[in-house]
Amino acid sequence: MQEYEETVKKAKDAWKVWADIPAPKRGEIVRQIGDALRKKSKVLGSLVSLEMGKIFVEGVGEVQEYIDVCDYAVGLSRMIGGPVLPSERPGHALIEQWNPVGLVGIITAFNFPVAVYGWNNAIALISGNVCLWKGAPTTPLTSVAVTKTALAKDERVDLVSFTGSTNVGKQVALTVQERFVFEDADLNLVIPSALFAAVGTAGQRCTTTRRLFLHESVHDVVVEKLAKAYKQVRIGDPWDPSTMYGPLHTKQAVDMYLAAVDQAKQQGGTVVCGGKVIDRPGNYVEPTIVTGLAHNAPIVHTETFAPILYVLKFKGNVLKSTARKCLN
């Protein structure tokens, strides 16, 4: 806690100086951050793969997201302004000016250890704020480890940005994405789209597709085609450029995957594809498709950070009811 206290104090002191620097000059410093990242993007992407487990191309892509938001922030630094409003007094105008909020606490999750921080950091900096970063404890090489609870409760931290699990995320209104496939859908688009959305980053994205709703007229053919596509996924070393699918982040994630598969079976689901741990070094599991679950099955409403796709059947005239049941 002593280190945390010293860090917060220094950050608050730094803010007094940083907030007075003109926004375009703050943008110039952010530009230099982006340039430094650009020079080391492949090395940093490799580090993300080593630490988190996602494939190399995704690791590099994540660093690129930080670079892109730096470029965006540089332009924004020269366009920060407020509206000019008419005044009731003759010869006067009302000018609205945006001011920095102060110290921004950024709490990030393991699955995107670079990008999420970058999204917050670059914009906060050009706006005149300073940042204190608390990364996930399982990705210490990519982030600086400080105390999460203290950061969230500290009144000296003027704004907190949080990215993490559903249980914690409910406190900040986590949004869950859904996917619906109707009878007239182009299956040539559905299969590859659903495949990557469900197994990309080994199912460890906040935006991973976990529930696929299929109209009854296309349900069987989509499941069959999707299962064949799953079996063709290249599983291997995340540093190998030809690999599409790497390991889960930790052994705990593997245990959660197995528990979810078991619960799905107990609740009436059928494992069409996958469902087992892969016999090789590392935290590798099979990308999994489960069918036959009721729309209100508890496991369908539980987010598991793993490559498990629950395929649910619906009829055209009950779509709204289905959506309400699954979104609640």
Image: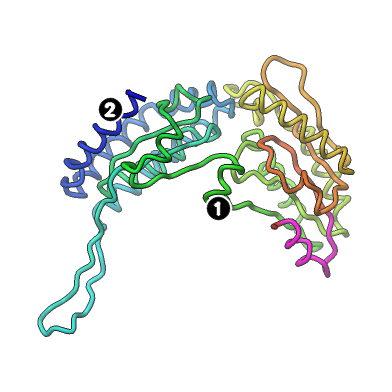
Q: Nearer the viewer, residue 309 or 78?
A: 309
Left or right placement of residue 136 versus residue 181 in this view: left
Residue situated furthest top in the rendering: 281
Q: Nearer the viewer, residue 170 or 178?
A: 170
Q: Residue at x 69, y 42 (%)?
A: 198
Estimate how packed mark 1 is, as few (under 14), some (14 to 19) or many (20 or more) residues with alpha carbons within 10 Å: few
Where residue 166 sits in the image (x, y, percent)? Answer: 61, 43
Q: Mark 2 and 1 residues: CB-CB less than 8 Å, in contact?
A: no
Left or right placement of residue 165 versus residue 283 in this view: left
Where residue 260 sits in the image (x, y, percent)? Answer: 77, 35
Q: Residue at x 83, y 40 (%)?
A: 264
Amino acid beneath label 2: Glu
Amino acid beneath label 1: Ala
Dominant secondary structure (helix, strand or loop) of the stretch shown in magenta = helix
Residue 78 - label: none
Where residue 168 sits in the image (x, y, percent)? Answer: 56, 42
Residue holding disc 1: 173
Region rendered in magenta: 313-326
Structural distance between the alpha carbons of marks 2 and 1: 32 Å
Q: Mark 2 or mark 1: which is in front? A: 2
Q: Residue at x 68, y 48 (%)?
A: 193
